[in-house]
Image (cartoon, grey):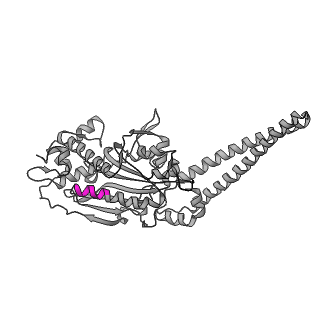
């Protein structure tokens, strides 16, 4: 959530920044500033009224002690009137605060100055590429056929049990999934991230805190009886570990990692680009989350990017990094790098990670602050990244490493799988 004082002090910058998302928000910002002005004036009037009421109450006590009952009773009438007026003011203040919050919740984050304007993925900027794209024989198969041939994943069985987008992993397919999760977690903890196990359902306050609500409400599975949501990513519960927390400056940065299944009710479509593991409603992902001082957050973002690069290098997968344009960025992000691996059998790039800096957008919602050296409470910056999402990583591993003898396993994973080839 954008900070009102930044909108007030840097309105032109906010307008220009959100234009990169193809949004024209001058009227929205004017309404937010109007509501904030009403809020501040009402709060000041209410504070003065309460202060006057307290002063009169003390004076009434003194008058009663002095035997001046008539004067005291006259003042009591005034305090009664003040209480009635203060109730009206308080109700008005509450309604104004609610309106202001609702208006702020509708605005996405302001993109970083390095983000280019654009309307779709076609406008994203490639900033890095590494690895050789394998040349496969004409008989090469996409991962959904490989999964069937080697009995690794059963999409139809998952469809029977639950529905489309809920695959069943079997045998070496299940073990490869488990190996990837353990490998990712070990890589992350070796890099200084503390592993945590977190709930797979969250309440509305948690989803609101990280920006899934109200923006992504239609994409989340909801347990309506208990008013809980299945998590779309571990980012939500991990970041909410710090909701309503005041950290000591010396405790920063905070770096966490965790594995969870993820659940997304994304709109379904058909075709090879969403077939097999390319788009699922339930999938596994290992996440990294950081809480940083504002002046360190962009250096930390580059550290996160380098960390994901090192993992992909060990998996021996060709990949590229895109800096997303304003029109393709997530609602909460100020700057996002997407990682894509190349699927040789499908002959296309598959997104497998997003690494983002949210600046104070989430921490303002979360009330996540730290006390600086001057004793002032400041909003921290939050960051997160997929490290990594499994489905498309697995798809690329199966497709790129297929041979006549079987599917080869990258050497970094062999200690985790216990086998070097799927025959």
Residue drawn where x is 33% and y is 66% of the image: 127
The correct choice, above or below, for 303 with respect to 66 in the image is below
Q: Position of residue 130 (x, y in %)?
A: 25, 64
**Observer-nearest residue: 353 or 222?**
353
Q: Position of residue 312 (x, y in %)?
A: 26, 56
Q: Position of residue 99 (x, y in %)?
A: 61, 49
- Asked whether 312 falls inside the magenta stretch, the response is yes
The correct choice, above or below, for 171 with respect to 339 in the image is above
Q: Is residue 180 left or right of residue 20?
A: left
Residue drawn where x is 30% and y is 65% of the image: 128
**Observer-nearest residue: 319 or 244?**
244
Q: Is residue 299 left or right of residue 28?
A: left
Q: Is residue 175 left or right of residue 370?
A: left
Seen as rendered, the residue at the extreme left is 405
Q: Is residue 153 visible?
A: no
Q: Position of residue 388 (x, y in %)?
A: 30, 51
Highlighted range, magenta? 307-316
Residue drawn where x is 49% and y is 64% of the image: 17
Count the numbered circles shown.
Answer: 0
**Observer-nearest residue: 371 or 301?**
371
Figure quadrant of residue 232? top left
Q: Is residue 284 left or right of residue 412?
A: right
Q: Main secondary structure of the magenta part?
A: helix
Q: Is residue 94 visible?
A: yes
- Asked whether 24 falls inside the magenta stretch, the response is no
């Amino acid at each position: 959530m954008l900070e009102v004082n930044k909108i007030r002090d840097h309105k032109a910058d906010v307008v220009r920044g959100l234009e990169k998302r193809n949004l024209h928000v001058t009227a929205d910002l004017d309404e937010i500033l109007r509501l904030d002005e009403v809020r501040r004036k009402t709060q000041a009037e209410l504070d003065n009224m309460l202060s006057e009421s307290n002063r009169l109450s003390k004076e009434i006590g003194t008058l009663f002690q002095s035997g001046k009952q008539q004067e005291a009773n006259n003042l009591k009438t005034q305090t009664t009137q003040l209480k009635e007026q203060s109730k009206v003011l308080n109700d008005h203040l509450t309604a104004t605060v609610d309106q202001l919050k609702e208006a702020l919740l509708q605005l996405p984050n302001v993109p970083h100055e390095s983000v280019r304007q654009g309307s779709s993925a076609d406008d994203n900027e490639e900033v890095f590429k590494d690895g050789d794209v394998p040349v496969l024989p004409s008989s090469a198969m996409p991962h959904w056929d490989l999964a069937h041939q080697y009995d690794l994943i059963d999409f139809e069985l998952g469809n029977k049990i639950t529905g489309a987008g809920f695959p069943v992993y079997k045998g070496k397919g299940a073990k490869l999934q488990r190996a990837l999760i353990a490998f990712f977690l070990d890589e992350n903890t070796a890099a200084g991230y503390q592993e945590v196990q977190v709930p797979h359902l969250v309440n509305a306050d948690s989803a609101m805190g990280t920006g899934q609500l109200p923006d992504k409400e239609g994409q989340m599975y909801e347990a309506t009886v208990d008013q809980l949501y299945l998590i779309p990513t571990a980012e939500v519960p991990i970041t909410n570990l710090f909701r309503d927390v005041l950290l000591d400056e010396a405790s920063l940065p905070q770096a966490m990692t965790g594995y969870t299944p993820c659940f997304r009710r994304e709109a379904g479509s058909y075709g090879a680009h969403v077939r097999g593991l390319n788009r699922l409603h339930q999938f596994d992902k290992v996440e990294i989350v950081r809480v940083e001082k504002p002046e360190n957050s962009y250096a930390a973002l580059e550290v996160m990017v380098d960390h994901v690069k090192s993992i992909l290098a060990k998996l021996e997968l060709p990949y590229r990094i895109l800096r997303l344009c304003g029109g393709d960025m997530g609602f909460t992000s100020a700057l996002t790098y997407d990682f894509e691996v190349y699927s040789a059998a499908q002959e296309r790039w598959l997104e497998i990670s997003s690494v983002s800096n949210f600046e104070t957008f989430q921490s303002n919602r979360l009330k996540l602050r730290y006390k600086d050296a001057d004793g002032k409470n400041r909003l921290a910056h939050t960051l997160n990244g997929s490290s990594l999402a499994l489905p498309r990583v697995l798809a690329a591993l199966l497709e790129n490493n297929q041979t006549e003898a079987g599917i080869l396993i990258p050497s970094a994973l062999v200690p985790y799988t216990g086998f070097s080839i799927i025959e």
